[in-house]
Image (cartoon, rainbow, N blue to C red):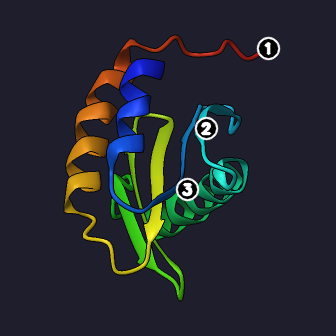
Amino acid sequence: MSARFDALRSLPGVVAAALVGPDGLPIELLGEGGDALAAELTALRVSLDRVCRRLGAGEVTRLAFTSERVEVVAVTSGDFVLGVAQTRGTDTRAAQQLLARLALELTDLPRPEFA
């Protein structure tokens, strides 16, 4: 996944990117804020999954938000979450398309076995 994950570097305004595994731990990180993004994407996924369960809305497949300084876009594929933070005002369409393509490739990653 590393070479493909590196494609995120070519996106304009990338501050951080993260791929988080089913156990909530980061698999791939990009940028100084990669660790923080990974941790927060995990927390958001847990919260949003709970909301969707209560609403009977199905699984979360995409999330996006804008803060004062960054635009964050993330996609899910099974138990994996892949997200990128870009400088606010950056057009996120290219990031959304790349994340969607990368998410399709996540099915090839091994799943950790839990005891």
In this figure, which residue is indicated by the disc labeled 3? 45
When the figure is inspected, residue 37 is found, relative to residue 87, above or below; the finding is above
Q: Residue furthest right?
A: 115
First in sequence: mark 2 vs mark 3: 2
Query: Which quadrant of the structure image shows residue 96?
Result: bottom left
Q: Residue 36, percent across and down?
A: 71, 56
Distance Cα–Cα, label 2 vs label 1: 26 Å
> What's the amino acid at mark 1?
Ala
Mark 1 element type = loop
Name the residue rendered at 53%, 88% in the picture: 68
Res 1 visible: no
Which circle, 1 or 3, is nearer the viewer? 3
- For mark 1, does the 10 Å Cα neighbourhood hold few (<14), some (14 to 19), or many (20 or more) residues? few
Distance Cα–Cα, label 2 vs label 3: 17 Å
In this rendering, would 115 be left or right of 10? right
> What's the amino acid at mark 2?
Leu
Which circle, 2 or 3, is nearer the viewer? 2
- For mark 3, does the 10 Å Cα neighbourhood hold few (<14), some (14 to 19), or many (20 or more) residues? many
Name the residue rendered at 48%, 21% in the picture: 2
Q: Residue 41, percent across and down?
A: 59, 55
**Label for residue 57?**
none
Distance Cα–Cα, label 1 vs label 3: 22 Å
Quarter of the image that includes the N terminus: top left
Res 97 visible: yes
Name the residue rendered at 43%, 31% in the picture: 6
In this rendering, would 100 be left or right of 84? left
Name the residue rendered at 55%, 56% in the picture: 45
